[in-house]
Image (cartoon, rainbow, N blue to C red):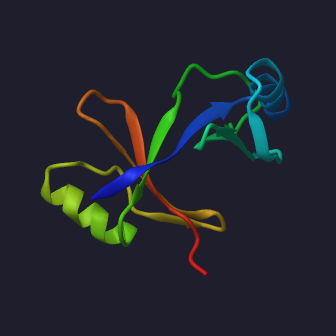
Amino acid sequence: MASGVAAVWVPVSDMQRAVAFYRDALGLTVKSEDDDWSEIDANGLLIGLNGRESAGPSSDGGAVVSFQPDGRIEDEVADLKAKGVDFAGDVSEHPWGKIIPFKDSEGNDLQLYSPPQG
């Protein structure tokens, strides 16, 4: 089962503008910043600012709640599939960890996230 929310990912079109908003307007702490991914500490909850693929504005998507599984991400996927959760794809692996997106019963975007090992 999921052990809690690992992060909330927010897609952004302009990383510098988004970081400035969360830092300057909301007064939150910027933990890391780069062009594709920045991390904001919201009183212990990680808000990940995720750079959009294209520079143009998009009305698709929104915030994504990212859950960290208790054990291996692959085991959690198998458990959720057994409970009727549909996954559109497979676990993808990145330098910053593994993810697999899915939707809740209302069509909201969720994902499982597992940080890199080692």
For this view, does 62 lie left or right of residue 94?
Answer: left
Where residue 63 appears, x then y in whole percent?
Answer: 52, 31
- From the top left corner, tell me how far across and down residue 105 is, in percent: 23, 33
Which quarter of the figure has residue 26? top right
- How many numbered marks does the figure carry? 0
Residue under the point 60% across and 33% down: 10
Q: Which residue lies at the image location 73% right of the left edge and 29% below the top edge?
A: 13
Q: Residue furthest bottom?
A: 118
Q: Nearer the viewer, residue 91 or 116?
A: 116
Q: Nearer the viewer, residue 55 or 27?
A: 27
Quadrant where the image shows the C terminus? bottom right
| 35 shown above or below 56 | below
Residue at the (27%, 27%) spot, across then down: 106
The answer to whether residue 5 is left or right of residue 63 is left
- Above or below residue 25? Residue 69 is below
User: Which residue corresponds to the image point at 57% horizontal and 39% vertical from the top-left?
Assistant: 9
Please determine whether, in this image, residue 117 is positioned above or below residue 96: below
Q: Position of residue 58 (x, y in %)?
A: 63, 22
Quadrant, the N terminus: bottom left
**Horizontal placement of 103 versus 14: left or right?**
left
Q: Is residue 97 left or right of residue 34?
A: left
In front: 17, or 29? 29
Q: Position of residue 48 (x, y in %)?
A: 64, 42
